[in-house]
Image (spheres, grey):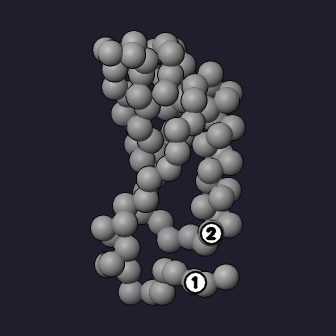
Amino acid sequence: MAKSIESATALSKSLPDWKSRIEHLTESKEYLVEITTPDVQFSLSAFSGLTDICLIAAHDSGTTFDGLQVAVHKVGNLRKKWWQFW
């Protein structure tokens, strides 16, 4: 979530190789920034690293990191084992 269009734009430009979308939320007068990565397969530690990158990018652009969503509908299409017990 960004309080200004400038902050939303700065966040979307901080990850130039990924798709981004900015939506103005009229009720809260904030901007929702949605950033989509390419389809990838990675470990839990890589997922944790991605979270760190998102937190830093949000902080540096003056926005709030709200979390990550995983497209679990695509997980069933994977041929390799995608889960592991620790």
Instruction: From the image, tell me which residue sits under label 2.
Output: 44
Q: Amino acid at mark 2?
A: Leu
Instruction: From the image, tell me which residue sits under label 1.
Output: 84
Q: How many marks?
A: 2
Quadrant hosting residue 29: top left
- Residue 24 picture location, percent across and down: 34, 19
- Residue 53 picture location, percent across and down: 65, 46
The crowding category of the residue bearing disc 1, from other C-alpha atoms within 10 Å (few below 14, some 14 to 19, many at least 20), is: few
Quarter of the image with the C terminus in it: bottom right
Q: Residue at x 61, y 32 (%)?
A: 58
User: Does residue 28 appear to the left or right of 53 in the view shown?
Assistant: left
Marks 1 and 2 close (CB-CB < 8 Å): yes
Nearer to us in this view, 1 or 80: 1
Q: Is residue 61 visible?
A: yes
Nearer to us in this view, 86 or 68: 86
Q: Amino acid at mark 1?
A: Gln
- Residue 79 picture location, percent across and down: 39, 86
Q: Residue at x 62, y 69 (%)?
A: 44
